[in-house]
Amino acid sequence: MSLAPPATRTGFRFTGWHFLTVIVGFFIVVIGVDVTFAVLAYRTHPGEVSVTPYEDGLVYDRNIARLRRQEFLGWTAAAAAQPHTVVVLMQDRDGRPVSGLSFTGKLERPATETGRVVPHFVETSPGRYEARENGLSGAWDLTAIAQDRQARTFQLERRLTWP
């Protein structure tokens, strides 16, 4: 009987230490990428939305108070885009037209401030106010403030679209 010499292994053998190295390396790469992205995100946008947050909060509080006063008035407004005309209809709590208002306002594009238009409203019938504006097409944002003789104000904001 002859004894065979032990077989020599030539080649790579994947052991538990290799597996541990692969797993640890994988998580090091993932954590490194996450940290890199977080640092880049913070540098490009630190999270500050406004440079005057306190003042913005005060303006917000004033807007809420203005909306409560408007709700107490009971007025409602509807706005429409008609050919070459902006029409605003004002009604009181009981659905009667509100007459004798003076309007100030502006029309501006939703995405840009270029081409701002200041409409001049005239009361054409009780509660119906019209402003003639030629050359309007597409979407415009109307912001108007109506004021009566007792200095009560009503602000309306509507998006109007002309063909």
Image: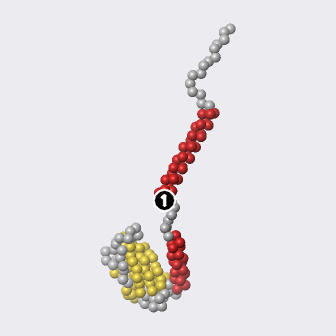
x, y percentage for residue 39? 51, 53
| Viewer-side residue, 81 vs 16 | 16
Q: Which amino acid, mark 1? A: His
* Quarter of the image that includes the C terminus: bottom left
* Quarter of the image that includes the N terminus: top right
Query: Is label 1 in a helix, a strand or a loop?
Result: loop
Does 8 appear above or below 151?
above
Give the residue number, with chain letter if any, for mark 1: 45
| Viewer-side residue, 46 vs 68 | 46
Residue at image position (40%, 67%) is 111
Residue at image position (66%, 9%) is 2
Q: Is residue 5 left or right of residue 117?
A: right
x, y percentage for residue 51? 49, 67
x, y percentage for residue 149? 45, 91
Residue at image position (53%, 72%) is 54
Q: Is residue 38 left or right of residue 163?
A: right
Numbered circles on residues, count: 1
State the residue lying farthest toward the left.
Answer: 135
